Image (cartoon, coloured by chain):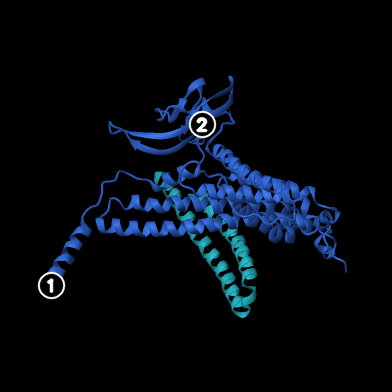
Amino acid sequence: MNHIKRLLCVALVVFAMMPAVQAEGFSAKEVVLEHIKDSHDWHITDIKNSEGQIVPIAIPLPVIVNSSTGWHVFLSSQFEHHADNSGLRQGPFGLAIATEGDYAGKIVENGEPVLDLSITKTVAVMFINVAILLCCILFSARWYKRRKASDPAPGGFVGFIELLVMYVVEDIIKPGVGKGYEKYAPYLLTCFFFIFTCNVMGLIPFPPGSGNVTGNIAVTFFLALCTFIVVQFSGNKHYWKDIFWPDVPLLLKAPVPLMPLIEFVGIFTKPFALMIRLFANIMAGHAIAVAMPCIIFLVASMTAGVFYSMSAVSIIMSIFMMCLECLVCFIQAMVFTLLSSVFIGMAKAEPAHE
Amino acid sequence: MITTLLAIEGVAKLGAAVGAGLAAIGAGIGIGKIGGSAMDAMARQPEVISKLMTNMIIAAALIEGVALFAAVIAFMCL
């Protein structure tokens, strides 16, 4: 019996030392960046066809540019798949996608970027997310139109939407905004549901999900800009007085307007922090969600023992990180809405009576 | 000349890595303190656990925002 055990141990060690699989050069950084960055076509995967060539499966998206020859609309499949000697993917009308240099990934004409309003991957995914969101919300709203307030509460999907809406209104909007919260509830609820839907769809690994919408700084910039506009336009006299002539000792505001300057800069830093917080959280989450399976590819060229054990580690880490990401999706949507409602509440502040 | 350029690029990557590590330390310390205080409060008053949990999550998200701000800057240095 001991002989057999010893033999099995030796066999296991020998097996663990053998090389596992052949792997070509694999750059984890490129794979992660490709999933996070925007692009003109929706690249799904690569497959090997019958001749052994690697064929990418990609959904081409419309390209809408305004170059020196006017407006052009065409599908992005008309660009070459591979770059030529000067690093440009040639296309029609003298346009090309640069693959390196300052304008990498953008459409250029003779080296200069053109006005590009294309439906890129982020835009297409955003349209899909908005369509899903509208279906969910409008379907639930129809349920309420056909019933009176004294009817029993809804169940099923409508009940779930009502749960989310009531949670946001009761625990986030009402305490944050204070009096008169009904006027701002539509905007804040839209914020919450849009961010939540985009975050959740970004976690699903295959189309129509897997798009990096809220992890794109342009999208979060626009959301923060909307909050900024809503807050400034709902500021009453006391809000502006508190910024430019706050209730502090005279030396802090008279010869050198120290506090007013700090408060004025604070108007801009608060939405800026909103933008960075949402962008960084979601982008980091997507990067980790892609990088965890990349570990398997990185250790593929090592011995079998390392390969199998690290694959198991990678799978466990992936499951854990995806669970964390589900939580982060909801928390980031909630924190964005909460801070927006708190800023609106501060803008409508009543003066503290002494 | 070439060695200087290579050294600059190497130092940039080193800076990015050190910055990301420091951001992680900052986030760890901040959220650890929040979690610790929340644990103490929950042990003291078990009936308000859900309220404490909500506020703990909010504070952790705010701290993580600042730490990820540093992580984004570190990523731009790469």
Compared to residue A76, the image places residue A31 above or below, namely below
Which residue corresponds to mark 1?
A: A1
Residue A304 found in image quarter: bottom left
Residue at x 51% of width, y 62% of height: B24
Q: Amino acid at mark 1?
A: Met
Question: Closer to the camera, A352 or A251?
Answer: A352
Identified by mark 2, the residue type is: Leu
Same chain for the residues at labels 1 and 2, yes or no? yes
Residue under numbered circle 2: A61
Q: Which chain is blue?
A: A
Label 1 vs label 2, nearer the camera: 1
Judge from the rendering whether residue A108 lies leftward or rightward of residue A151; answer left or right.
Answer: left
Residue B1 or A205: which is nearer the viewer?
A205
Judging depth in this view, the residue of A182 and A294 nearest the camera is A182
The chain under label 2 reads: A
Marks 1 and 2, the one that precedes in the sequence:
1
Residue A17, percent across and down?
21, 58
Q: Residue at x 31, y 60 (%)?
A: A309
If the image is split into quadrants, where does the N terminus of chain B sit? top left
Residue B19 visible within the image: no
Q: Position of residue A229 (x, y in %)?
A: 74, 46
Residue at 84%, 53% (x, y): give it. Answer: A236
The chain under label 1 reads A
**Secondary structure beneath label 1:** loop
User: Residue A329 is drawn in which quadrant?
Assistant: bottom right
Residue beneath the point at 72% across and 53% down: A265
Chain B in the picture: what colour? cyan
